[in-house]
Every structure is written in C-alpha cells, then in structure tokens.
Image (spheres, rainbow, N blue to C red):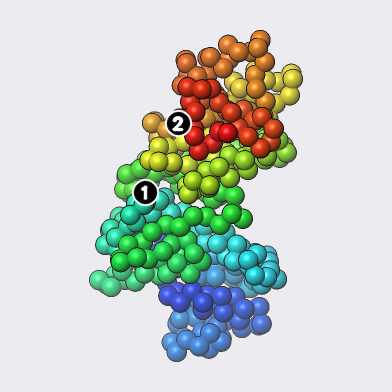
Amino acid sequence: MLIKTKEIPQADTFSNVIKTVIAVASGKTTYQEIAIAIGEKGLRQGRYYRKAGEILGLLDKGGINHAVLTSRGEEYLNAKGQNQKVIMVQSILNARIFQRVIPFLESKLPRGAKSDEFVDFLKGVTEPTTGETTLPRRASTIIGWLKAVGLVEVKQDQYILCKLPDEINAIPFVDESEPLLPHAFSLSEYQDMEIKASANARTISYIVDETKIERANASHRMLTNLVASRIRAVGAFPRYNSLVDLAAKISGKSFIFEMKSMGNTNVRAQIRRGISQLYEYRYLQNVPGAQLVLVVEQPLSRELGWMADYLINDRGIILVWDGDRKHLHCSQSHREILNFLVA
C-alpha cells in the first residue's frame, strides 16, 4: 500500500500554507489568485498550496478551480494563540502521510533519523517519483512541516521526534488498514495489513459499530484519557483507530490497550468481550509480540478473582484497574513492565 503522490504535500513553505487558508477565506479561490495572494511567482504554486490545505482538511474543492474552507478551516481561523496551533498540529497528524512518518521517526528515538534514512523510508512506502531531486524535496517538505509545528527538531542532519503537545490526547488513525504499530517499515508490512483489513472488512465493520457505542460512555472516555496521558508523559505517542482504543510503543515494546467500563451486573461479559477484542486487534495489527492490556474501571470482586488469574496467567493479558479516576493499579508482578502507567 503505497501512499499516493496526491496525498503528499509539495508546498515547501509552511507559513504560505497558512496564508493560503486566509486567502481562500478572503475570496481568493482559484489557484492563480492563491499564488498571487501568498506572493509566489509561479502560478502553479497556487495548486500546490491549495492541495496542501486539502491534505490538512482545512480546504476542499468547491468546483473546478475553486477552493472553499472546510469547517476545520473555519475553526482554525476563528481560534486564537495556542488553540490555533493545536488545531494545526491535529490537522497534520490526521493526514495519512504523517501517520506513516510519525511511527518511523518514533522508531529512531532517541538519536533521530538521518536524512538519508528518511529519504530511503519514503522511497519504499510512497508512489515512485520522477526526477532525482523530487524525493529529497518531498522529504524536506514533510520534515519542514513537522518542524514548523514543533513536532520535529533537526540537529546535525538528524530528525528527532518531539513530544506531543499536552492538548492532544492521542493520534487518530482514520484508516483501519494503516498499521498502528509497524515494526519493519517496509512496503510488504503495509500491504499485509491492507490484505488483513480487506479480508476481515465485515467483522471490522461489526466491531466498529460496537466500539462507537462503548466509546460514548463517560467512564470509557475517562479511562482512555487517563491511559493516554500516562503514555504521553513518558514521551511516547498514543494512537487509536475506530477499533483499537489505544496503542503505543514504549521503550521498544508494543502495547495494545482495551478499556472497559462496567457495572455490577456486566463484569464477566465486559471482560470476556475485552479478551476477544484484544486478540482480534493484535491479529489484525499483525503484531504477535504486542503486550495486551485490559483496563477496567474498578477492581474485580473476590468472587471474580479467578478471572484475574485467568487473564494474567492463562491468557497473558495484563489487568489494570482504576482506583480513583486519577491512579491506575495492576498486580505486583506487572508493575515493572507498566511502570509508566500505574501509581
């Protein structure tokens, strides 16, 4: 699954991307008008910057050679200060090319990725380019955007991924066929994931519908936010899609988290559902070595203690529970592996 050229930004100057959104808001809707408004000499640059706004979800096509603001674009222009920056960071993280780039850069921490490593990575996972200079320019633009919003620091030809802003809870992956926890960063890995997602499309659709209902629960949201905040605190990058509540790589180890709210009458059902979901997610994500973690909103009763033993010792799933909406707990035997998470 190659990232298509049309999904990759060609707008070199990030500040001009912002100017483009402002220009469209003021009535400059054609690429010729955009180029003139942002001070680009070549009129075709207006196409590149209009497309950049579309990649970020800030602009959309309103007709032939006619750009319009999206609701996100309007939200960005109406925001102020830090809120505006957060919307822009979110817009970048929502774009598919950056959802493939971020895990690669994360895998190179703490030293960072060398520029030639990054170019080689892009060569393997994006549509072929024409011309020897196209791919390095593509890489330079992508890194330039990430640097402009504070997500990458460049030191001595090393691209070092920075921490997520506190205001961003986790990175949402829109496409279930895009792996959350890639490890080889080769085209075959992305193709395998696409094949699995396609073969299991009906099952995925069913689970997505179930997941939507559960995620509407306030307790579920609280657990997800709490876990995500702990992941971000250690400099890792929590991400999710319409199936997986959270996934992350921490100290080189892959984790998949499933959150379960529960009442007095549905504890068994929720735990059983969580077990099946975790196994399915690990299979679909093609990360057989990932540690599975089930997070519940209350400790299990003494009568259900056998379920904790079943989870931990038979299924290899770590059980974590909420203590007071601020602190998470697990068995003593797992405190070391989950030292980033538990109190």
Local packing at callout 2 (Cα closer than 10 Å; few below 14, some 14-19, many 20+) is some
Q: Looking at the picture, which amino acid does disc 2 mark?
A: Ile
The residue that appears at 52% across and 61% down in the rendered structure is 92
Instruction: From the top left corner, tell me how far across and down residue 157 is, in percent.
Output: 30, 66
Between 135 and 2, the residue placed more toward the observer is 135
Q: Which image quarter holds the C terminus?
A: top right
Please say if 249 is above or below 42: above
Cα separation, mark 1 vs mark 2, equals 19 Å
Q: Name the residue rendered at 56%, 75% in the picture.
A: 18
Residue 334, compared with residue 139, is above or below; it is above
> Is residue 159 placed above or below 236 in the rendered structure?
below
Q: Which residue is mark 2?
A: 337
Q: Earlier in the sequence, mark 1 or mark 2?
A: 1
Q: Mark 1 packing: few (<14 Cα in 10 Å), some, or many (20+)? A: some
Q: Which mark is residue 107?
A: 1
**Relative to 331, does residue 165 appear above or below in the rendering?**
below
- Which secondary structure lies at badge 2? loop
Q: Specify the quadrant of the image occupied by residue 53.
A: bottom right
Residue 321 lies in what quarter of the image? top right
The residue closer to the viewer here, 169 or 177, is: 169
Q: Is residue 41 visible?
A: yes
Q: Nearer the viewer, residue 108 or 103?
A: 108
- Inspect this view and state whether residue 260 appears: no
**Mark 1 is on which residue type?**
Ser
Q: Residue 27 appears in which quarter of the rendering?
A: bottom right
Residue 88 lies, in percent from the top left, at: 57, 65
| Residue 225, percent from left and from top | 63, 43
